[in-house]
Image (tube, helix red, strand yellow):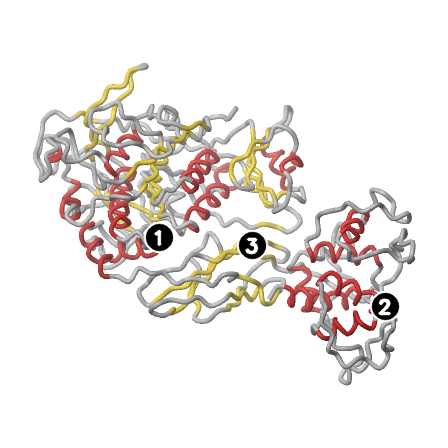
Amino acid sequence: MRSAFTLALISGLMLTTTLPTFDIDQAQVSLGAATEAGVPYAEDHVLVKLKPGAQIQALGPNTEGVFDRWREVPVPPGKTPQEVVHEMAGRLDVELAELDYEVQLDPGLSPVALGEAGTLAVNDPLAGFQWHFPAAQVDAAWTESTGQGVVVAIVDTGISQGGEDLACHTFIDPYNAITETVGTSAADDDNGHGTHVAGTVAQCTNNGVGVAGIAYDAQLMPVKVLDAGGSGLISVIAQGIDWARGHGADVINLSLGGCCASSVLTDAIDAAHAAGIVIVAAAGNSGSGSIAFPASHPDVIAVGAVDYNRDRTFYSNGGSGLDLVAPGGDNTQDANGDGHPDGVLQETFEVTGMTKTFGYYYLQGTSMATAHVTGAVALMLSLRPEASPQTIRSVLDSTTQDLGAPGFDTSYGHGLLQMRDALDELAIRDTAAPTWATGARLKVSRYGENDLVLSWNGASDDVGVTGYRLRLMGTSGFDVAGTSAPVTGLSPGTAYRFEVQARDESGNWSQPLAAVVHTARHFTDIAGQAFRQDILWLSGEDITRGCNPPVNDEFCPGRVLNRQTMSAFLVRALGLTVNSHPPFIDVAAGGVFAEDIGRLATAGITRGCNPPDNDEFCPSGPVTRAALAALLVRALDLDENTHVGFVDVPAGSVFAEDIGRLATAGITQGCNPPHNDRFCPDGLVTRGQLAAFLHRALSLERP
């Protein structure tokens, strides 16, 4: 049973953005500013993100999926949610643990009923009262696009068709994320907010009834994440966004927000953005100088509100992350003198007891402004379906009417939405984004304790790639001319999620290449070591965790490697998970390395140490260079041998062919530089030497 989470129906509250970081061996605990500020949270469960490959069963009974690797973990009797967060964060199979926060809708913003009719260029009798449409060039935009072919997800309180003016729409994949049920009735609005927002986006138009909508030929996807009181859990909103992503939404409208950043919601937005979906969110209604989350997410178009006079409203949030403003209205004014409040007019309902009273109501808020921008995006995508989210955002920002201080400012962003100008600009733009070759990826070229060098494959474009943008998720990133860049100021032994995008001469951005990478641990005993960079690489790849648990601040580079430790290194390096091998008689069942040894044998990389029986593994036995050569040749499936041979490896000897194949692949160069005409087959391998062998081998295997 999920406890209530109330999210600002913008009427919204503001979230402050905090950058998530993940420790390799211990997940981050996310309690943060919301707890300090007294923001409510779910008492019956916490949110946990599993590490890749971890199993849900490992978290215990009664866990529920949220999406992807996120799970709800119940709070057992006698424990607090904070205690469970800390407990979960201490597990090796958990990447992140956090509370499921609540946010509350601002009180006191009641709808105002419309009394009289007006006129506009369409035959909807009340459209003349929609002063906010001409202010954003909606009527002019209709001659270019009406939103046909675009699916808009309204992630809100649901949408109701109980009135007279929304019957033209057949909803696409309606979903209730609170109850996890599908269908129109499941996603029915019981609050009124979602219906009002949906009407502004795509109300039936030129039907001789009621009011007009912006992208009236678009298709609506109701996704109910908030209840009748405007409440909903952060995790439910994340599920709603993920539903929209998985069911064909082109645009997601988030007329909601709250006080504090959430990792589960960030992950949902990241996934939707990576899928090419445009996401629009409300800046918030607290009159603050910083915008709400998720509007503050770098990949979300953040929308503030202006009144009839095109002044920033008293309630609208601003800040450096604000993209633009749109009409949000002010019910305390009648600046146009039409005898009615200057709110945003749409069909919706009031609830009295169990009864919905439908009508045409003025509402105010950045929720209403957001719906205008979402409608504009639907018009744009109908005109140019191939346009990327970055292109849509760039065109919107560059075609606004400048308000306030010249150029960008924190009160109005780039300015007031102008839909016709945006459509005209989009029509003449090159919208073909750069593309990545199959197999392109973002990777680490060099590991450090406090820094990384990241590199990626070059992208291609019909008009030419002008550069790249590399960013740590949750930040705006920085521009890079080439295909690699150093990143500094990081913490040792920590996981970070980066992505890179290519930009062309027309300002189009490619889909992102993303990767989670780790900085190396800080080892106190590797300074000045010949194999230091190899050891840092081994740590960054999470193949080594140190030699002195539980502290693990040493690597012991000069220690001779034994066979059981070697098995653990190879299993982690190769990602081996299957163990179906009969146990070796000298390997204790349940021992520290028993599982690794079994996996290595199952993969056929080791056959034992006492041929022909091979029922022993000799776990404490040292590893020779010749034996390691054989293991790596099997692990990497190397079959080419064109090496001239080493003087201390007799032709036809047991390991001669393996050593030759290893040298041919460039994994070994010999043991006596600079001549390197010897291999030292009987030499014992140290942990530092193994780091060098594995670094070369895995770099060869994964270029």
CA distance for labels 1 and 3 = 23 Å
Q: Position of residue 464 (x, y in %)?
A: 36, 70
Tag 1 secondary structure: helix
Q: In the rendered image, is residue 116 in sight?
A: yes
Of residues 148 and 234, the one nearer the viewer is 148
Please name the amino acid that badge 1 sits on.
Pro
Q: Which mark identifies residue 389?
A: 1
Tag 2 secondary structure: loop
Q: In the rendered image, is residue 530 in sight?
A: no
Q: Which residue is mark 3?
A: 516
CA distance for labels 3 and 2 = 35 Å
Please name the amino acid that badge 2 sits on.
Leu
Residue at 78%, 64% in the rendered image: 687
Residue 293, located in which quarter of the rendered image?
top left
Upstream in sequence: badge 1 or badge 3: 1
Q: Which residue is mark 2?
A: 684
Tag 3 secondary structure: strand
Upstream in sequence: badge 3 or badge 2: 3
Of residues 39 and 296, the one nearer the viewer is 296
Q: Residue furthest bottom?
A: 675
Please name the amino acid that badge 3 sits on.
Val
Residue at 20%, 49% in the rendered image: 419
Q: Mark 3: give few (<14), some (14-19) or many (20+) Cα within 10 Å.
A: some
